[in-house]
Image: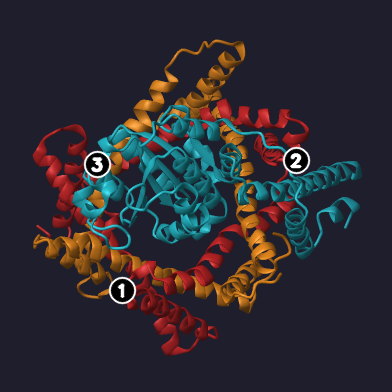
Chain colours: A red, B orange, C cyan
């Protein structure tokens, strides 16, 4: 037995089976064991939150020490940001509820996060201008519903011609409902099959390198 | 009136810096990008430590010493970065993967499969002709969209039977167009919030 | 370059600059257009409206700063409805930045001043819980087994609202607003399928198409789709806010996008026709 692979595979199987059994049985022993598994899981997920930061320290720490890249000062700034948030967050003992942490979060993190996500609107506009063409029948199908949904979503048009609102509602009824239900069933089958394959040890990608 | 709050000025600076990339890659954007990555990682550490304290250490304080095992497993996660003992991280990962898969597939069978099929298998006729028409389109949409993804049966995409996946592709394209339309609204809706912040909260042009 | 091709040769800076101006103008000069409320948002509103006074709602703040511009107003409007109906709210966050959204939302709703609500008796925030579906299953399965303190560190046994709340059986309704597909699906799997609870969900508009099958089959009793759903909720609850103001921005900006799409297609087909004539 290879303890480096077989024991993790056995753990995956056992934990997964108990979780599934909790859904299909009402045995108190299974429910109690699953409660313990859930509690352990929450703590382990919390430990896992720091992995990204450790990796950033490795990668950017190397860039700072080698100073081969011209943008190495940005790496130093990045690590400084990590340290600043951690020191302010943990220093007061109040974590994210301290007024100081709320201040730096709302001043620095919130505007960048919301803007990065939102500024894709500019790319979409330029992309729609350059690329969205009804070149063939397939593209026309995508084009026509996109146009009617945008018309329905733009308050100016339904306010002037209410029919655009109703067309949008109809598109989201049988058209989107039908196609995406089919996709959802397919996703469900795929997820369940992949899950079972992982539980029985046929999919071992999560174990990483040999 | 223009805001005098330094928080608002810093937030406005970072909003403009993050937007600037849409026009051209520049140093100010790189600065804000690295700020964001660092801040995000720092926030994750803060929340991680808090969760470990509230959901792990709290149990140890109650006398549940078995939680020391969880702490050891949690530290083993970081052996992922070790050249020789990297395999130690497989134990906690196996626990998390088993937990995640068990929790999700047990309900996915019901939500994504049984309920969806049961809803599709209902009667097509409805109170009005329009609703009956919609039910027929929905029914055809579900079956043809599903048939589009069948690749294990050779004859599925050929001959007369090939019409089903072809119609399925058309239905999916129509639905994807609707998805694109909604994505446009998402992005503009998100950015309008930032415009409001700049014009109202920072510059004070509107109330 | 032919005249047709010149139509699509506008510099990127010009296009993006026009989009930016189209977004700023309606903020300065609002249009105040009438709203047509969508069915999905109306169903969310009606589901909450039908709850008896004193019902306990489990609410998940499943978004962070990235979703705050549109989902923040949706959450604020929802909380106004919860407090107006005298519902008890147990708030949690399955998104790591959700606990930072809580003070922003509560500052805007101001439940103590406007509704006379008391923290610990009418609403409580148990903070961010890592693990997404594990957290959901944990809270619904046995709250006291997984949570020991609220987000400020107060033991939950000392919080009046949580004294008799053990798990799923004590919640009348589960509601979430999120930017994450995992969280949105996770609540359907855990709250609806595993624990049989009534469920309503809010999300970004671009997630609506993938979550629609759950709404159509009754697994989601109501659905708030992004800024449209947020503005519908603000209208229905009578608390106009940033979402309704954003509607004017959408009017200008999306109209401009449509114009660009039309120009692009006219030039494409014009150039194609001109090439055919040449041959």
x and y percentages locating residue B34 in the rendered image: 51, 75
Res. B115 in view: yes
Dot 1 falls on which chain? Answer: A
Given residues A133 and A31, the one toward you in this image is A31
The answer, for residue A197, to whether it is visible in the render is no
Which residue shows up at 42% across the image and 57% down it?
C98
The spot of residue A166 in percent (x, y) is: 67, 28
Q: Nearer the viewer, mark 3 or mark 2?
A: 3
Q: CA distance from mark 3 to mark 2?
A: 46 Å
Residue linked to disc 2: A156
The residue tagged with tag 3: helix, strand or loop?
loop
Between A76 and A153, the residue placed more toward the observer is A153
Mark 3 → mark 1, Cα distance in angstroms: 30 Å
What chain letter is assigned to the residue under label 3?
A: C
Query: Circle 1 sits in a helix, a strand or a loop, which is it?
Result: loop
Kindly identify which chain the residue marked by label 2 belongs to: A
Image side of residue C156 versus residue C61, left or right: left
Q: Are marks 2 and 1 in contact (CB under 8 Å)?
A: no
Query: Where does the image place residue C146, in percent across and percent down from the top left?
Result: 22, 52
Q: Are marks 3 and 1 on the same chain?
A: no
What is the number of the mark on residue B36? none
Quadrant (top left, top right, bottom left, bottom right) of the C terminus of chain A: bottom left
The 10 Å Cα crowd at callout 3, few under 14, some 14 to 19, many 20 or more, is: some
Name the residue carrying label 1: A93
Answer with the quarter of the image where residue C53 lies.
Answer: top left
Tell me: residue B118, above or below residue C52: above
Which of A191/C86 is in front? C86
State which quarter of the image contains the N terminus of chain A: bottom left
According to the picture, the residue beneath numbered tag 3 turns out to be C167
Q: Tell me how far mark 2 sits from mark 1, CA to CA.
A: 50 Å
User: Residue drawn 75% across and 53% down?
Assistant: C26
């Amino acid at each position: 037995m290879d303890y480096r692979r077989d024991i993790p595979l056995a753990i995956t199987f056992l934990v997964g089976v108990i979780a599934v059994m909790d859904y299909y049985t009402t045995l108190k022993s299974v429910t109690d064991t699953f409660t313990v598994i859930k509690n352990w899981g929450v703590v382990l997920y919390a430990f896992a939150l720091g992995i990204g930061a450790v990796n950033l320290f490795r990668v950017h720490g190397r860039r700072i020490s080698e100073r081969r890249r011209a943008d190495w000062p940005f790496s130093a700034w990045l690590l400084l940001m990590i340290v600043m948030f951690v020191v302010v967050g943990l220093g007061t003992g109040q974590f994210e509820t301290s007024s100081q942490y709320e201040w730096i979060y709302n001043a620095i993190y919130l505007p960048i996060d919301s803007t990065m996500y939102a500024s894709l609107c500019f790319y979409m506009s330029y992309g729609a201008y350059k690329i969205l063409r009804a070149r063939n029948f397939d593209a026309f199908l995508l084009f026509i519903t996109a146009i009617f949904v945008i018309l329905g979503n733009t308050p100016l048009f339904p306010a002037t011609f209410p029919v655009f609102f109703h067309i949008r509602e109809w598109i989201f009824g049988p058209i989107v409902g039908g196609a995406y239900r089919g996709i959802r069933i397919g996703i469900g089958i795929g997820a369940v099959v992949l899950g079972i394959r992982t539980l029985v040890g046929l999919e071992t990608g999560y174990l990483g390198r040999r | 009136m223009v805001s005098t709050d330094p928080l608002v000025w810093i937030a406005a600076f970072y909003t403009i810096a993050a937007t600037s990339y849409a026009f051209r890659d520049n140093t100010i954007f790189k600065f804000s990008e690295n700020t964001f990555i660092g801040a995000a990682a720092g926030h994750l550490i803060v929340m991680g430590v808090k969760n470990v304290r509230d959901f792990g250490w709290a149990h140890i304080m109650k006398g549940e010493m078995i939680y020391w095992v969880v702490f050891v497993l949690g530290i083993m996660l970081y052996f992922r970065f070790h050249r020789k003992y990297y395999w130690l991280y497989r134990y906690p990962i196996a626990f998390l993967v088993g937990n995640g898969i068990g929790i999700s597939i047990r309900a996915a069978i019901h939500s994504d499969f049984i309920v969806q099929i049961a809803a599709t298998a209902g009667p097509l006729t409805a109170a009005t002709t329009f609703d009956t028409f919609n039910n027929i389109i929905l029914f055809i949409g579900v079956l043809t969209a599903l048939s589009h993804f069948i690749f294990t049966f050779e004859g599925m995409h050929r001959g007369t039977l090939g019409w089903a996946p072809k119609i399925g592709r058309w239905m999916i394209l129509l639905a994807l167009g609707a998805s694109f339309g909604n994505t446009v609204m998402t992005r503009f809706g998100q950015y309008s919030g930032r415009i409001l912040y700049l014009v109202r909260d920072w510059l004070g042009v509107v109330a | 370059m032919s005249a047709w091709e010149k139509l699509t040769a506008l510099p990127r800076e010009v296009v993006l600059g026009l989009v930016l101006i189209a977004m700023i103008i309606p903020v300065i000069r609002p249009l105040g257009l009438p709203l047509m409320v969508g069915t999905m948002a109306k169903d969310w509103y009606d589901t909450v409206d039908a709850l008896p006074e004193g019902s306990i709602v489990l609410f998940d703040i499943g978004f962070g700063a990235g979703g705050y511009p549109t989902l923040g107003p949706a959450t604020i409007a929802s909380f106004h409805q919860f407090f107006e109906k005298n519902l008890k709210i147990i708030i949690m966050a399955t998104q790591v930045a959700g606990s930072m959204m809580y003070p922003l939302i509560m500052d805007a709703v101001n439940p103590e001043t406007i509704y006379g609500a008391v923290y610990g008796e009418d609403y409580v925030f148990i903070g961010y819980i890592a693990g997404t579906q594990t957290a959901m299953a944990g809270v619904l399965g046995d709250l006291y087994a997984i949570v020991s303190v609220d987000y400020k560190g107060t033991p939950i046994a000392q919080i009046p609202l949580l004294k008799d709340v053990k798990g799923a059986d004590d919640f009348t309704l589960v509601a979430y607003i999120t930017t994450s597909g995992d969280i949105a699906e996770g609540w359907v799997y855990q709250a609806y399928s595993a624990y049989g609870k009534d469920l309503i969900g809010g999300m970004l508009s671009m997630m609506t198409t993938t979550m629609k099958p759950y709404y159509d089959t009754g697994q989601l009793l109501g659905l708030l789709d992004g800024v449209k759903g947020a503005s519908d909720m603000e209208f229905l609850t009578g608390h106009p806010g940033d979402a309704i103001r954003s509607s004017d921005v959408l009017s200008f900006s999306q109209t401009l996008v449509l114009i660009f799409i039309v120009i692009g297609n006219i030039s494409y087909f014009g150039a194609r026709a001109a090439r055919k004539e040449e041959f």
